[in-house]
Image (cartoon, grey):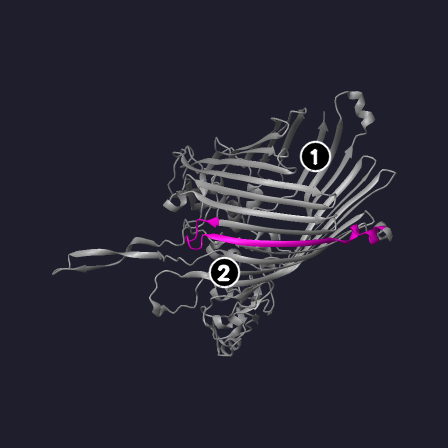
Amino acid sequence: MIYPNINWYDAMFENFTYNSHYAINASGGGKVARYYMALAWDRDTGILKDNDLNNFRNNIDINRYNILAKINVNLTRTTRFDINLNSIFQDYNGPLHEATSIFNSVMSGNPVEFPMVWQPDEEHQFVRHVLFGRDSDNAMANPYAEMVRGFRDGFASNIITQATLEQDFGFLTQGLLFRAKASIGAEASNMTSRSYSPYYYTLGEYDVVNDAYTLVNIQEGSEALGAPANSNSTHYRSYYELGLHYNRTFADAHDVTAQFIYTMDEDRNTSGSTIEESLPFRNQGLRGRLTYGYKGRYMVEASLTYNGSEKFHKSHRWGLFPAIAVGYMISNEKFWQDGGINRVIPKLKFKYSWGRVGNDNIGADRFLFLSHIGHGGPGYIFGQNFNNGYGGFTIGRDANNDIQWEIAEKQNIGIEMNIANIADIQVEYFHEYRSHIYMKRENLPPSMGLTADVYGNLGEVESGGIDGSIDIKKGWSNGLFLQGRFNFTYAGAEIRVAPEPNYNYPWRSRVGHPVNQTWGYFAERLFIDQSDIDNSPSQTWGVLRPGDIKYKDINDDGVITADDMVPMGYPTSPEINYGVGLSIGYKGFDISAFAQGQDLVSFYIDRAGVSPFIGRRNTLSIVAEDHWSVDNPVSETFWPRLSTTTNENNLQQSSWWLRNGRIFRLKTLEVGYTFPEKWLKKTKAIQSARVYFSSSNLFKIDDFEEWDIEMGSNGLGYPLQRVFSVGVHMTF
């Protein structure tokens, strides 16, 4: 108690938790009407330890209920009506703070400063509150107190209703169909939080001989939960679609389809706090599509989309976006069939597409053709005694009637093939050139006197890559079957035009580099001694000492500044993504696995977030085991010189903290057994039954061992959990 040594993680977290999932569905109907209904209940719990200090629970406990109903009705022989109802309800109970915040405080908590809770001394034997520990300066958080000092409970619902009406106009002309859709969704949530202020105590005096101590109250608290604090939000969404569809084959050779569709959608935030947030978001669009195919060999498609957005001035509100595509199924040619090639390659198709796509999702701002002007700017005073004054205005945004759609011109060329009816292969090369990208003008001089940032459709980005997949399916007469899928995507994007400042050095420019490229200082090594510091280029982030990071003077001007920052590492978004799945079965037994990975990606360690001893923070084991010190004066360690205060020099974004973000992870593994039908016939009720065991996040392969890369740059968030499940699936 007097000399605590707390493992905050073990004290506050369980090693595992139990979650459950239950589902049941039913379907049926006849020629006129059909239905499908499904009910599901999920219960997810967290790994926070409940305590007996309070009369409420603070561990995460989420109950989620999903109700799905689909009804299809033939109103007449040519009229069909479908309605889908999907409702999700969630009941939540959890700690006052987010679990990630709690976990962060645990990992930063100092194990020796104070106990979680003091045992009462003689003076406080009969107090009605908990005596939480804290440091004498009342500066450090007690992670345990923060976890148990309150709770949140709430309810959320998401209800979506979609109705579709189809009318077959085949009696007018064969293949003509009218379809109308309406989708209405309402999402609402309400969260209530209640908390009390903890009483914090620190050690006053300690009698070593009698092992007795006195406590000092350093912060008054409250002995009861305070009044509830409520927060709520509601969203209403609607989507409407009217369309004519035409699909007909002439002379068993000419396949013709056509579509003409009108759409309108609205998103209303009824809990918006500003005028703009409370106004409905609305978009409209018209699109037409025409396709032609000849005997399944030659295919051509053309489409035209005309969309309107509320964000732009009426002179740029509507955008016209065309697209074309062609395909050639060479495997349907007579020579392919007669020559026997189809026995080896039964399918081979070449395809190409080109199109322009518009994007109005260019930021949170709306109505960019309107100014943002408010009160509170510098004013002026006048009069003989300067007793009269008027406040000025602030300009948050200048009106810009020229803001318009971002345009992406896309091209794809690809091939589809099947080999021996076993493997389906698809490979595509894609290219995209985006222009009119909404960006801030960074090349305007201060002499223009502008108080608000100026934006425009100024940027251009070129991207491209390869996307491919292989699907394998094979069965044998002895009951063995094999299914597999491998997909791979490489995508890179480079900036071609950007409104940058006039940099003095070419390596500062983002043009020609990936969109998510980062810049940093090149860390040469750690300073050896004071002489090394005195004879190196000046670094102006505080007083330098041996063991601090030494940066390279790129422009050779004798001082390290922003002009010495260079592009380094891969982009922060992976350029390669891939996945592989495999299923094998034999006489009722089956095993399946799925793994995925990423490559050509980098990330920086959050050096400020994991800096040891700052605010008496705890230290990671990797820092304790591998840092520069007088006894370990090496120039290459994980952590440079330790400090109890913030060392700005060592916190600069640099190659010292750059890491490779490649990772390969086994996401899921499942083993199951399906009972033979002859066993189930005896029950006269069960049509099929399968039991299974599954697990997720079993292992990973990467170049970074300090924490899981998917947790982010500091690894102090809520941990990625390994999940094991046992279940049974039955059909009656």
Q: Which residue is mark 1?
A: 726
With respect to residue 217, does 402 lie above or below? below
Q: Residues within 10 Å of mark 1 (few under 14, many from 20)?
A: some
Q: Secondary structure at mark 2?
A: strand
Q: Type of residue at label 1?
A: Val
Residue 162's label in the rendered image is none
Look at the picture and state if 129 lies above or below 644.
above
| Residue 323 seen by the camera | yes
The reply, left or right, for residue 632 in relation to residue 399 is: right
Residue underneath mark 2: 436
Image position of 35 (left or right of 152): right
Q: Taking 244 as reference, is 437 left or right?
A: left
Q: Position of residue 528 (x, y in %)?
A: 56, 73
In this picture, which residue range is highlighted in magenta? Answer: 308-337
Going by the numbered disc 2, the residue's amino acid type is His
Q: Residue lying furthest left in this view?
A: 384
Residue at the spot 59% in from the left edge and 50% down from the top edge: 303
- Residue 595 percent coordinates (x, y): 70, 49
Among the two numbered marks 2 and 1 on one chain, the one whose residue lies closer to the N terminus: 2
For the residue pair 83 and 356, the one nearer the viewer reads as 356
Residue at x 55% of width, y 49% of height: 717
Quadrant of residue 482 in the image?
A: top right
- Looking at the picture, tell me which residue is in the foreground, 696 or 389: 389
